[in-house]
Image (spheres, helix red, strand yellow):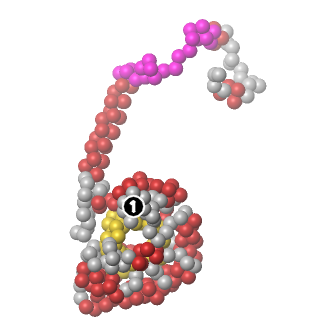
Amino acid sequence: MSRAKPTVADLLAGKGVRQRTNMFVTSLEEARAAEEAGLDMICIPDDAMSEAVREAAPTTFITAALAYGIRVTAEDYLRMGFAMYRLRADAVYCAASLDTVARLAAEGLPVIGHIGFIPTHATWTRGFRAVGKTADSALRVWRQARALEAAGAFGAEIELVPEPVAAAIARRSPLFLMSMGSGAGCDAQYLFSMDILGAHTGHYPRHSKTYRDFNAEYERLHAERVAAYREYRADVETGTYPAAGHKLELPDNEMTRFLAALEAGGGDDPGGVPWMEIATPDG
């Protein structure tokens, strides 16, 4: 059954009605798979966003994540935000200052911010750890949400916040809140594709859920790659490769003429012969 791509208005109208699915992807292949799986939303790094991604996921809401630390000034973010708009992204993610969020929003770009634990600000929270576990900390998360509202963002990722706190904020805030490890009381669930696929050997967050073991498949494919390379090396060393089917041949009479010309010294002086004439393939 066909479906329509959700708009910002659709997402906001659906608050409290049903949870959406959102996933961070990094490639065209993952974007295509998310579309075929029927996910509502994906977020993709700005340097991976392209017309091909839009075409591969025509009914998926696409957020382009504007790289923090590479974009520095508000003008940098604005320039990249409009580049993502031209590539038909539906929104931009921005973890920069409220002034920058406001600058993007003032130009009509739909902006998603970030509240709760923010990885790029981990030094302020003693590393990668949950926030909002005390009343004072939870109130700071609430104030973050209010500040993003005032800046003009329409949504926010809320990361590593206790479920009751996140749910209370979601009920009271007009922001479309996407839970990254903040429980089921928000407007969407948000996970990383690499965690869902089991595609890495590093740490898997407690809130993630792994549905496949791609890393084992990668290891299997690596072993197959090494085996194929070894077989190739052995074929070359034993003369098995190239075999008859891998070689170009020419008629015996042409070979005879060529050898005769070589013996007679023909073709030793290329003077006056254009290079492209020499390289022209046989008709």
Q: Which residue was labeled with disc 1?
A: 25
Q: Residue at x 38, y 76 (%)?
A: 14
The residue shown at (43%, 74%) is 10
Percent position (x, y) of residue 106?
56, 82
Neighbour tally class for label 1: few under 14, some 14-19, many 20 plus, Cα within 10 Å: many
**Residue sticking out furthest to the front:** 1
Q: Is residue 271 left or right of residue 192?
A: right
Instruction: Tell me the residue at 29%/56% (across/down).
Output: 197
The quarter of the image holding the C terminus is: top right
> Which residue type does callout 1 highlight?
Val
**From this viewpoint, which residue is outermost toward the right?**
272
The residue at the point 30 percent across, 48 percent down is 218
Picture layout, residue 165 above or below residue 7: below
Rendering quarter of residue 136: bottom left
Front-most of 165 and 98? 165
- Magenta extent: 237-258
- Image height of 131 relative to 278, above or below: below
